């Protein structure tokens, strides 16, 4: 068990931190969280700077346009950028953390060359077309149909909770290419398509979240034509391709946020000392307890990263253990923030309050806590499947 | 950075587990409980204590020049985690900390206990007592395998020291971690055997979710305990003890719940884990004081 970094890793950290100190003051002011076109411009602008400095797709393989960095270097990157208060991955989330890694791992050489560089350069934004009104947590039940017409698929159906649909150029779309029948399991007839968002037949209707913003949308697909060459992986093999994507989502997508939460916890303590709430022993102890939890979550992150570095594989189901605790701890953090603010907790002008609202999605998005508990119980602990 | 067990560390952990499974299995555990019930007080198996000493359990971290094994705190943590799994009784931590200072402790010939809070364990049985135990009165210990004495409320208390934020707190946390992992296994095993309503109870989400949360608690505590062993940072030790106490106590309670009526019986081992977890949680700093210390550093 070793928590020390190599000289090479320390040097990488120092170089990155110097670059951040130089670059962050040059950034334009951040956009209003409700302004999605503004956020797209801001987030892709940041991605372009990362690209120009050689930090884009750091941990992606070199043949996918990445830097081929080790998981530990990626961890250092996430730690340092969060510590420095650099912009969040934002609108590039799906491209960098879902669709990109999936194409890098499962796509052909042509597909990698077509889709990966624009993601890394901050030129193209992706959205996620997985869930449907009747297929959310039960994703394999999706019924958006795609049938072959020559060298195209014709796609009809509807999607919901399509993150970033409003501002996306591409959609990672799951479609049913073989109808459900008694003999074939429902997850066997699914394919993974890259759908251009400007194709005729797509209607996007933004959904307003309880936080007031339009993070996601519902999407209606009326005979949208998608070239067969846009399919990643074999026909009807989309479920396996998707599992690759989801393991990335659960394994690494929240890593940098733990660092951010530790920073916010420090800010909470400073604010409480300033406004007198620190005198409340119950609140103080809650903050102390959260401090232990976020420290442990960071250590668990290092544990998981070390494991994936050893196995060389994608992150395992251990990501579910992490996500279960992290999503809960994040919500507790912002409940404590509200307690620190007192009446100020009702003023949306304070960024903590927007984050408090956003945190409510953490136990739902990317697999609800209840589904994650089933995954942990069945796949790690080996309990029988059931209801 | 490679925050995983090394081959040697795995081998050490497996070796200690094999030793304890061979020498202090469930039959031995229940025999010890029965004997303590009959005698009205727990007695320590001196032969086992010396075997532990001979196997290097107490001298793990002593330099080889002093007759030790020359390993570090992370290895000691792995050994104590196994002791926690097995519910091994005795003042293990105090004797370990005395090795190299008190002759005979390292070999297991001398059993050492310490006054590290309002309670002292194994006072009558110990060969050496560290700290002031004047005015100690026997208590009826909740844990049948940990005899306790209470110190007067106005007795002088050590400020800081090994049991608050040093190796003692960390090794106690490691025992809690072992217990938390063990009760998770016990709950899962029971849920895979017990049939109700025509199916294994482990197929019910209500039971699954209890078990999943037990694993989450144990793994969070594991990250904290192992990291604190590597860094030795007093605040990390403090957080590790806090989370490991929580995992051990709450996992034992959830394990009891999964066992249903069976879990409430003397016959099931669940209560032994819960009671020992309570005793260990009562060792050193209280949860509230640990939280205050962590908050003060924010």
Image (cartoon, rainbow, N blue to C red):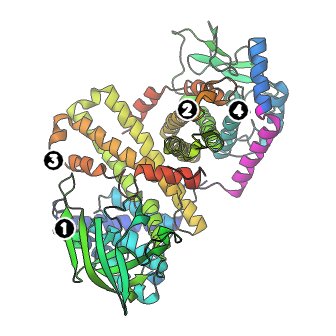
Examine the image and state in which quarter residue A13 appears.
bottom left
User: Marks 2 and 4: same chain?
Assistant: yes
What's the distance in space between the residues labelled 3 and 4, CA to CA?
55 Å
State which quadrant residue B134 falls in: top right
Percent across and percent down for residue A160 are 28, 64
**Element type where label 4 sits in the image:** helix
Residue B76 falls left or right of residue A368 = right
Label 1: chain? A
**Crowding near the residue tagged with mark 1, few <14, some 14–19, many ≥20 C-alpha atoms within 10 Å:** some
**Chain letter of the residue carrying label 3:** A
Specify the subunit that label 2 lies on. B
Residue B96 is tagged as 4
Q: Nearer the viewer, residue A142 or B38?
A: A142
| Position of residue A211 in the picture relative to residue A147 (left or right) | left
Residue A310, position in %: x, y? 60, 65
Regarding mark 3 in the picture, which secondary structure is present there? loop
Q: Position of residue B225 (x, y in %)?
A: 56, 42
The residue tagged 1 is: A205
Residue located beneath label 3 in the image: A348
Q: Which residues are magenta?
A: B1-26
| Circle nearer the viewer, 2 or 4 | 2
Q: Which residue is mark 2?
A: B257
Q: Is residue A59 left or right of residue A284?
A: right
- Please rate how many residues cluster around mark 3, counting C-alpha atoms within 10 Å: few if below 14, some from 14 to 19, many from 20: some
Secondary structure of the residue carrying numbered label 2: helix
Q: Chain for mark 4?
A: B
Mark pair 2, 4: CA separation: 34 Å
A145, A114: nearer the viewer: A145
Query: In the displayed structure, would residue A131 be above or below residue A198?
Result: above
Q: Earlier in the sequence, mark 2 or mark 4?
A: 4
């Amino acid at each position: 068990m070793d928590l020390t970094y190599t000289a090479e890793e320390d040097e990488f950290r120092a170089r990155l931190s110097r670059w951040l100190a130089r670059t962050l003051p040059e950034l334009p002011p951040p956009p209003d969280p409700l302004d999605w076109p503004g956020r797209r411009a801001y987030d892709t602008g940041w991605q372009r700077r990362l690209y120009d400095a050689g930090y884009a797709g750091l941990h992606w393989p070199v043949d996918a346009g990445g830097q081929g960095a080790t998981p530990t270097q990626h961890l250092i990157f996430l730690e340092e950028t969060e510590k420095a208060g650099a912009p969040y991955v934002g609108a590039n989330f799906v491209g960098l953390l879902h669709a990109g890694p999936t194409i890098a791992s499962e796509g052909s050489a042509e597909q990698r060359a077509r889709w990966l560089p624009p993601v890394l350069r901050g030129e193209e934004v992706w959205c996620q077309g997985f869930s449907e009104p009747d297929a959310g947590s039960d994703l394999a039940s999706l019924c958006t149909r795609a049938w072959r017409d020559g060298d195209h698929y014709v796609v009809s159906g509807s999607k919901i909770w399509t993150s970033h649909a409003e501002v996306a150029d591409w959609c990672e779309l799951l479609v049913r290419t073989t109808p459900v029948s008694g003999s074939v399991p429902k997850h066997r007839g699914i394919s993974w398509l890259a759908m251009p968002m400007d194709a005729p037949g797509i209607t996007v209707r933004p959904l307003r979240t309880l936080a007031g913003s339009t993070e996601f949308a519902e999407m209606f697909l009326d005979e949208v034509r998608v070239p067969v060459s846009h399919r990643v992986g074999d026909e009807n093999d989309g479920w396996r391709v998707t599992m690759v994507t989801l393991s990335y989502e659960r394994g690494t997508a929240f890593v940098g946020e733990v660092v951010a939460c530790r920073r916010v916890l420090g800010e909470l303590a400073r604010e409480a000392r300033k406004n007198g709430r620190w005198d409340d022993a119950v609140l103080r102890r809650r903050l102390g307890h959260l401090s232990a939890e976020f420290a442990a979550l960071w250590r668990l992150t290092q544990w998981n990263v070390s494991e994936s570095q050893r196995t060389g594989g994608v992150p395992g189901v251990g990501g579910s253990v992490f996500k279960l605790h992290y999503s809960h701890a994040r919500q507790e953090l912002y409940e404590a923030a509200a307690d620190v603010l007192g009446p100020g907790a009702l003023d949306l002008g304070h960024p903590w309050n927007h984050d408090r609202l956003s945190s409510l999605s953490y136990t739902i998005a990317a697999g609800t806590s209840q589904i994650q508990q089933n995954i942990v119980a069945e796949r790690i602990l080996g309990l029988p499947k059931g209801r | 950075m490679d925050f995983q067990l090394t081959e040697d560390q795995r081998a050490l952990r497996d070796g200690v587990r094999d030793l304890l499974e061979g020498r202090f299995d469930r039959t031995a555990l229940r025999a010890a409980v029965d004997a303590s019930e009959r005698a009205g007080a727990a007695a320590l198996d001196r032969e086992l204590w010396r075997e532990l000493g001979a196997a290097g359990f107490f001298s793990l971290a002593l330099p080889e020049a002093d007759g030790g094994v020359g390993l570090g705190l992370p290895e000691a943590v792995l050994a104590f985690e196994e002791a926690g799994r097995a519910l091994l009784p005795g003042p293990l931590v105090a004797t370990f900390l005395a090795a190299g200072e008190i002759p005979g402790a390292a070999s297991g010939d001398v059993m050492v206990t310490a006054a590290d809070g309002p309670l002292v364990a194994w006072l009558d049985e110990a060969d050496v007592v560290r700290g002031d135990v004047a005015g100690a009165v026997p208590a009826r210990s909740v844990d049948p395998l940990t005899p306790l004495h209470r110190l007067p409320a106005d007795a002088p208390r050590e400020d800081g020291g090994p049991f608050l934020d040093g190796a003692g707190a960390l090794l106690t946390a490691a025992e809690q971690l072992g217990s938390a992992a063990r009760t998770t296994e016990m709950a899962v095993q029971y849920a895979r055997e017990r049939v109700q309503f025509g199916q294994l109870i482990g197929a019910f989400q209500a039971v699954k979710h209890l078990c999943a949360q037990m694993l989450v608690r144990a793994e969070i505590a594991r990250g904290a305990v192992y990291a604190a062993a590597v860094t030795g940072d007093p605040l990390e030790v403090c957080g590790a003890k806090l989370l490991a106490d929580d995992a051990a106590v709450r996992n034992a309670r959830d394990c009891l719940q999964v066992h249903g009526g069976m879990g409430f019986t003397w016959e099931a081992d669940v209560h032994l884990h819960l009671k020992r977890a309570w005793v260990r949680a009562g060792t050193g700093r209280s949860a509230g004081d640990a939280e205050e210390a962590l908050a003060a550093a924010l």
